[in-house]
Amino acid sequence: MREHAAFIVEEMSCEHCINTIKEKVSRLNGVYEVLVDLEAKRVVVEYDAERLDAETIKDTIEDAGYKVR
């Protein structure tokens, strides 16, 4: 079942941040798409809810060094 989760990541400030978050989250089993809006400080992830949950995605972003709200 496809679901979307949105996160506010205020510490994102550059292309490197975007690439780091996309790379880490995309590696998770069940992720279909990762969209990052640097201006809005927003990350939206489309994922398979049967294989993954939003908390795991949040933890992955935080493990990459960013605070998620």
Image (cartoon, rainbow, N blue to C red):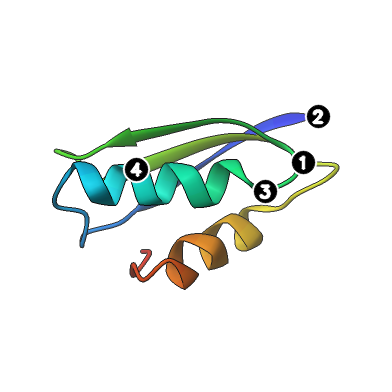
How far, Cα to Cα, is label 3 from label 2? 16 Å
In this picture, residue 59 sits left or right of residue 1: left
Q: CA distance from mark 4 to mark 1?
A: 24 Å
* Residue beneath the point at 44% across and 37% down: 44
The amino acid pointed to by label 3 is Leu
User: How dense is the environment of label 3, judged by Cα within 10 Å: few (below 14), some, or many (20 and up)?
Assistant: some
- On residue 69, the disc is none
**Residue 58, percent across and down?**
52, 61
Which callout, 3 or 1, points at the residue further toward the start of the chain?
3
Question: Above or below — where is 48 with respect to 63?
Answer: above
The local crowd at label 2, few if under 14, some if 14 to 19, many if 20 or more residues have their Cα within 10 Å, is few
User: Is 1 on the left-hand or right-hand side of 28?
Assistant: right
**Alpha carbon separation for disc pair 2 and 1:** 5 Å
Pointer 2: what residue? 1
Which secondary structure, mark 4?
helix
Q: Which of the two discs, 3 and 2, labels the residue nearer the N terminus?
A: 2
**Marks 3 and 2 in Cβ contact (< 8 Å):** no
Residue shown at 67% from the left, 35% from the top: 47
Residue 11, x across and y down, in percent: 20, 62
Marks 2,1: beta carbons within 8 A = yes
Give the x, y percent position of residue 2.
72, 28
Q: What residue sits right under mark 4 in the picture? A: 19
| Residue where numbered disc 3 is placed | 28
Residue furthest to the right in view is 50
Residue 49 is marked as 1
In 3D space, how far apart are the residues under numbered discs 3 and 1 (Cα atoms)? 12 Å
For marks 4 and 2, give the CA distance: 26 Å
Q: Is residue 21 left or right of residue 50?
A: left
